[in-house]
Amino acid sequence: VNELIEYHPETLVAIVAALDGDTGIIALISQADQEQRTLDLLRGRGIATDGIRFFMWPAESMWVQDFGPQQVIGDEVRIVDFEYDVSGRGIENQLPMAFAATFGMKISHCNLSMEGGNMLSNGRGFCISTSTIIDQNTTRGHDVQAIGRILHADFGFDRWSHVLPLAGEPTGHLDMFL
């Protein structure tokens, strides 16, 4: 919600309205007043807010997809915490553990360095990323086969494919083009 309420309130309204109460929402906020402002905005547009909960965390950027909790849903819901290795953003690397503790969720730790924006899944055992994940983890001692095994063990992916990132795009993330 951080940047959405500040700079893109209509997008926030559209996202919550599109969910139409079909799923619970946990909104990340970094300032206490963002909760009331969000509730006021949504209620002012006639959108029910009873399915929204808020999680306060001093995030430094809006890219929660990259550093936030990755949920694995199977027999139970659990959080997978991977190493978010971005200089000067250590507080964001701690978010998944705090989130899991706050909401009473199980957590497992993935021995890969990556950003969530570079991993997309179809929810049926297939994962795709860019080769950036390989570059990020060879220095940690993981080759391509080891990365595939770790993704299988931690996320349950039966198949993993990787493609080249967009030339010149600085993040190397898959979510920039797929």
Image (spheres, grey):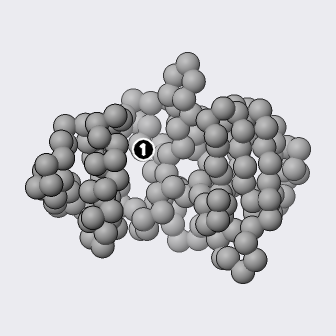
Q: Quadrant of residue 103?
A: top left
103 horizontally vs 129: left or right: left
The kind of secondary structure element at disc 1 is helix
- Tell which residue pokes out farthest to the top in this image: 75
Task: Give the x, y percent position of residue 151.
Answer: 73, 40
Task: Give the x, y percent position of residue 40.
Answer: 12, 56
- Quarter in which the C terminus is drawn: bottom right
Q: Quadrant of residue 74?
A: top right
- Number of numbered discs on residues: 1
Residue that numbered label 1 is attached to? 98
Q: In this rendering, does residue 158 appear at all? A: yes
- Tell which residue pokes out farthest to the bottom in this image: 168
Q: In this rendering, does residue 94 appear at all? A: no
Task: Give the x, y percent position of residue 6.
Answer: 27, 70
Q: Residue at x 88, y 51 (%)?
A: 143
130 horizontally vs 59: left or right: right
Q: Residue at x 85, y 43 (%)?
A: 146
89 vs 9, nearest the viewer: 9
Task: Give the x, y percent position of residue 109.
Answer: 62, 39
Crowding near the residue tagged with mark 1, few <14, some 14–19, many ≥20 C-alpha atoms within 10 Å: some
- Above/below status of 75 relative to 88: above
- Above/below status of 32 relative to 144: below
- Quarter in which the N terminus is drawn: bottom left
Q: Residue at x 44, y 37 (%)?
A: 100
- Above/below status of 173 relative to 97: below
98 vs 167, nearest the viewer: 167
Three-letter amino acid code at the position of disc 1: Ala
86 vs 20, nearest the viewer: 20
132 vs 92, nearest the viewer: 132
Q: Residue at x 21, y 60 (%)?
A: 34
